[in-house]
Image (cartoon, rainbow, N blue to C red):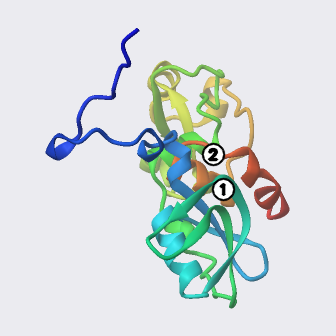
Amino acid sequence: MAIQLPPPGPGGFAPHPEHRRRGRESGRVLVLNATYEPINVCTVRRAAVLLLKEKAEIVEHSKFELRSESATLPRPVVIRLVTYVKVPRDTHRRKITRRAVFARDGWTCQYCGSRANLTVDHVIPRSRGGTHTWENVVAACRPCNMRKEDRFLHELGMVLRKKPTMPRERIWVLVATGSVRPDWEPYLSLSA
């Protein structure tokens, strides 16, 4: 019976199996303010630096460890800053992106519920005085967006599934990582 080795990495050496990435979400750490409010998502490396400089503490960790020649550190999943950091409340208001709108709206058309061919639509068309704000932008499938064109909803008898609002912190985690880890849930639901 032959033993199958992993393909050689750079320099001809085979990487150790534990050194491979353990999924996309494994490289991210949820950062909480001193008040346990979620404020950011960072890399494991950045989290380790904050921990070693004693600017943060581990709240949740995984079963894996980070190792150096002289130290071992539990692999952080959620960290909390030791001192409070003032976060401007309007920082996310300016970041209206397609991905953020889709994440806020659950990747579904806000007119028909379709999940295919999503675009961004202004509820009150910009050509008719609508603004580019969170309260006026929704995810819409291409057929609904083309049907609506630059008209008001009442002119077509169309109805929104839910009123658009500025997203909560959870959406920014989804935008940054693509998913929310189950062990982050308690900290994100506290801020909702």
At 23% from the left edge and 42% from the top edge, which residue is drawn?
13
> What residue is rendered at 76% in x and 58% in y?
188
Q: Which quadrant of the rendered structure holds the C terminus?
A: bottom right
| Outermost residue toward the front in this view | 1
Residue 154 placement: quadrant: top right
Q: Which label belongs to residue 126?
A: none
Q: Is label 1 in a helix, a strand or a loop?
A: loop
Count of numbered labels shown in the rendering: 2
Vertical comparison of 125 with 66: above or below:
above
Q: Residue at x 75, y 50 (%)?
A: 183
Q: Which mark is residue 104?
A: 2
SS at badge 2: helix
* Residue 142 sits above or below residue 66 on the image: above
Question: In the rendered structure, are the residues bearing label 1 and label 2 in contact, judged by CB atoms less than 8 Å apart?
Answer: yes
Q: Is residue 85 above or below residue 77?
A: below
Of mark 1 and mark 2, the one earlier in the sequence is 2
**Which residue is nearer to you in this view: 15 or 3?**
3
Q: Residue furthest bottom?
A: 83
Q: Nearer the viewer, residue 149 or 31?
A: 31
Question: Which quadrant of the view contains residue 58?
Answer: bottom right
| Residue of label 1 | 167
Q: Which residue sits at x=64%, y=27%?
A: 111
Residue 102 position, x and y percent, is 55, 40
Specify few, some or many for label 2: CA neighbours under 10 Å numbering under 14, 14-19, or 20 or more: many
Q: Give the side of residue 18 with respect to residue 169, left or right.
A: left
- The residue type indicated by label 2 comes to Arg
Whole-percent x, y for residue 67 in the image: 50, 64
Closest to the observer: 174 or 58? Answer: 58
In the picture, measured across the screen, residue 182 lies left or right of residue 48, that is right
